[in-house]
Image (spheres, grey):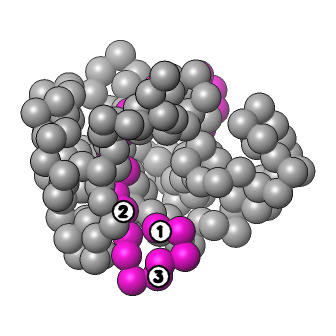
Amino acid sequence: MRIFICFLAFVFFASCEPKDSPKHYLSDSERDSLLVNIITLVAENATYANDSTRFNPEFRSYYVQLLPKYTLEKLEKTGEGQFVFLLNRPVGHLTKYRRSVIGQFQMKEGSLHPENFEEVVNTPHLDPETALKRGKFLFKELVKKGNLTEYIPLKHYVEWPDSTLTYHKKFNRWAFHE
């Protein structure tokens, strides 16, 4: 009975969160696990890891160490298991700049592992406040319209994709056009 009451309390409080808040969908520990999995996809590979092995258990601690540098700002389920996300992340070693990553994925059933993951756009290097503001705008537009095609030419909002880089879902990496 206690477990049931705790579950109802969790559902009640989670439902009080806006539907674009990660807290609406996930507990604190679930959010951290999902964020580490996203970091594993968007960050540079751990030493000795490659794109095929980066999710191996021996590399997880590297991505967990990056957790304080990344924030899952927005998460919204849009239908058929599709989630749109806004990630706030560092820009290399440039501590005064941030970047917003707006993308989408489906959750692998029974886990917190994103699949069909795609970074739709990355903002340029911006001061933290501007990166977040522009990221929130692009996030809302992706949720509303399902794409950001009209914003890609706006280089003060979108650094990638551009005329040289596109996102390859197969490898979960930005790559030069072939």
In the image, what residue occupies the spot 44% across and 28% down?
177
Where is residue 2 shown, x and y percent of the image? 58, 51
Question: Image check: 162 left or right of 141?
Answer: right
Q: Which residue is drawn at 50% across and 27% down?
A: 168
What's the magenta region? 91-112
Check the image and report above or below for 28 versus 10. below
Q: Where does the image place residue 98, in percent across and percent down from the top left?
A: 37, 70
* Residue highlighted by disc 2: 99
Q: Residue 95 carries which label?
A: 3
Pointer 1 local density, CA inside 10 Å: few below 14, some 14–19, many at least 20:
many
Indicate which disc residue 5 carries.
none
Q: Which amino acid does label 3 sit on?
A: Thr
Find out whether the residues at labels 2 and 1 contact each other: C-beta distance under 8 Å.
yes
The vertical placement of 135 against 81, above or below, is: below
Residue in the image at 47% along x and 78% along y:
94
102 part of magenta stretch:
yes
N-term mark: 1 or 3:
1
Q: What element carries label 1?
A: strand
Q: Is residue 120 left or right of residue 156?
A: right
Disc 1 marks which amino acid?
A: Pro
* Amino acid type, callout 2: Arg
Would you place residue 165 above or below residue 2 in this image?
A: above
